[in-house]
Amino acid sequence: MKVFRTLHVRGAEIELEQMLARLDEMVAQQPGWRRDSEMEDRVRERTATDYRCYSMIAPGAERRVQVWVVEKRGQVEVANVVAEDRGNLSYDEYNQAVEAFCERGVKLAAAGMALDVALGAPTFSPRDRLGDDVAAVLEDFASRTNKATGASHPQDSELWRKFVITAHKAGADVTPGDWLARWLASDAGFPVEVAYELAVRYENERQLLRQFESNAA
């Protein structure tokens, strides 16, 4: 499934500061790009956080977007990308903006420094988070179960419990956020409400198993 790409730059703080200074220079050299200090001031007044806001035309579109960057201890990251016209960005629009910002700005600014520039993938699979063995059990459940009822039927429930137990034994992610629900709905074909019910059920059952083991120890 498609996801919003991440962009992190990690390294020594002094080099991160140098990279950010270079980045401002690189942005100023890109036609249609600029740093929006006025927007930064507005956000700083509301959040007391020092974000950097870079305004640019999203590649392949006629929409201007704002790439919001924040510096944390030991890393700089893209916190969000929003459209200046206040409309929602598609996954493709968001990711194209992050990729362009990385290639035309961040990588050039970080050149020659001991910095790790990590651009996240634009797609996600359960295998990325769960590992091949656990994901295979999840995929088996998704392919064989009644999509409309989720894990309600006894046979489907058995497949579901096998996934939860396998994930628990493997020490897989307990709190997947929204990726499990999104994958079940977008890639596996479950109704949205069923997908989110299953995601909540997964977290609750994993927590129950952890509590059981803790009490039994």
Image: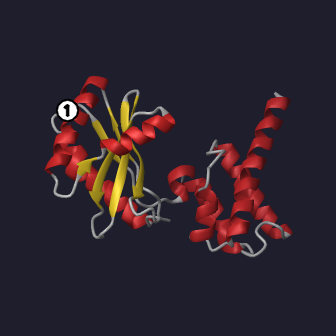
The residue that disc 1 covers is 113
From what the image shows, is residue 179 above or below residue 170? below
The answer to whether 137 is drawn above or below residue 147 in the figure is: above
Q: Is residue 88 left or right of residue 95?
A: right
In the foreground, 29 or 170? 29
Name the residue located 78 percent from the left edge and 42 percent from the top edge: 209
Q: Quadrant of the C terminus?
A: top right
Instruction: Indicate the secondary structure of the residue bearing disc 1.
Output: loop
Query: Is residue 173 in view?
Result: yes
Q: x, y percentage for residue 63?
A: 33, 66
Determine which quarter of the picture holds residue 161.
Answer: bottom right
In depth, the one of 79 and 28 nearer the eye is 28
Which residue is at a point 78% across and 49% down the rendered structure image? 205
107 with respect to 179 (left or right): left
Left or right: 198, with 16 as reference point:
right
| Place of residue 32 in the rendered image (x, y in percent of width and height, measured from the top left) | 20, 58
Residue 108, image x, y percentages: 18, 44
Q: Which of the 4 image quarters holds residue 163? A: bottom right
Kind of residue indicated by mark 1: Met
Give residue 85's position: percent from left, percent from top: 40, 63
Where 140 falls versus 19 (above or below)?
below
Residue sitting at x 63%, y 66%: 184
